[in-house]
């Protein structure tokens, strides 16, 4: 599974404007991290996703978007795995 996860992370990182990628399990344990994503943020990312899911518990997990002037952090949960993609805005 680790090789498959590494392949997915590499594919995400090859996407234009992506600066970092993090994947964590339901307990906040970092399974993979690349680029500007910090391993220490795995627990916080999972917690944000869990809290967002409580807003509409009967729907599929929402995508959480954190935005600054020049960066985006997109967080999405799939089953017990949560992923975060860190992107640069306005980079050509």
Image (cartoon, rainbow, N blue to C red):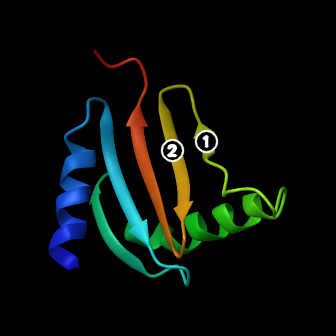
Residue 75: tell me if it is visible.
yes
Q: Position of residue 34 (x, y in %)?
A: 26, 58
Between the C-alphas of marks 2 and 1, the distance is 6 Å
SS type, badge 2: strand
* 68 horizontally vs 62: left or right: left
Cβ–Cβ under 8 Å for marks 2 and 1: yes
Instruction: Identify the residue position indicated by label 1 in the image.
Output: 65
SS type, badge 1: strand
Q: Residue at x 50, y 37 (%)?
A: 72
**Residue 45 sits in quarter:** bottom right
Which badge, 2 or 1, is on the more N-terminal residue? Answer: 1
Which quadrant: the N terminus? bottom left
**Residue 5 sits in quarter:** bottom left
Identify the disc placed on residue 46.
none
* 53 horizontally vs 69: left or right: right
Instruction: Identify the residue position indicated by label 2 in the image.
Output: 73
Which quadrant: the C terminus? top left
Q: Position of residue 24 (x, y in %)?
A: 44, 72
Give the residue furthest to the right. 55
| Residue in the foreground of this view, choosing between 71 and 83 | 83
Q: Residue at x 83, y 56 (%)?
A: 56
Q: Residue at x 81, y 64 (%)?
A: 57
């Amino acid at each position: 599974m680790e090789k498959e996860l590494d392949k997915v992370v590499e594919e995400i990182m090859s996407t234009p404007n992506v600066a970092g990628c993090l994947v964590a399990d339901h307990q906040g344990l970092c399974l993979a991290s690349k680029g500007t994503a910090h391993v220490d943020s795995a627990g916080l990312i999972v917690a944000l996703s869990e809290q967002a899911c409580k807003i509409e518990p009967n729907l599929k997990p929402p995508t959480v978007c954190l935005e600054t002037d020049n960066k985006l952090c997109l967080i999405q949960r799939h089953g017990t795995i949560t992923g975060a993609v860190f992107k640069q805005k306005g980079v050509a």
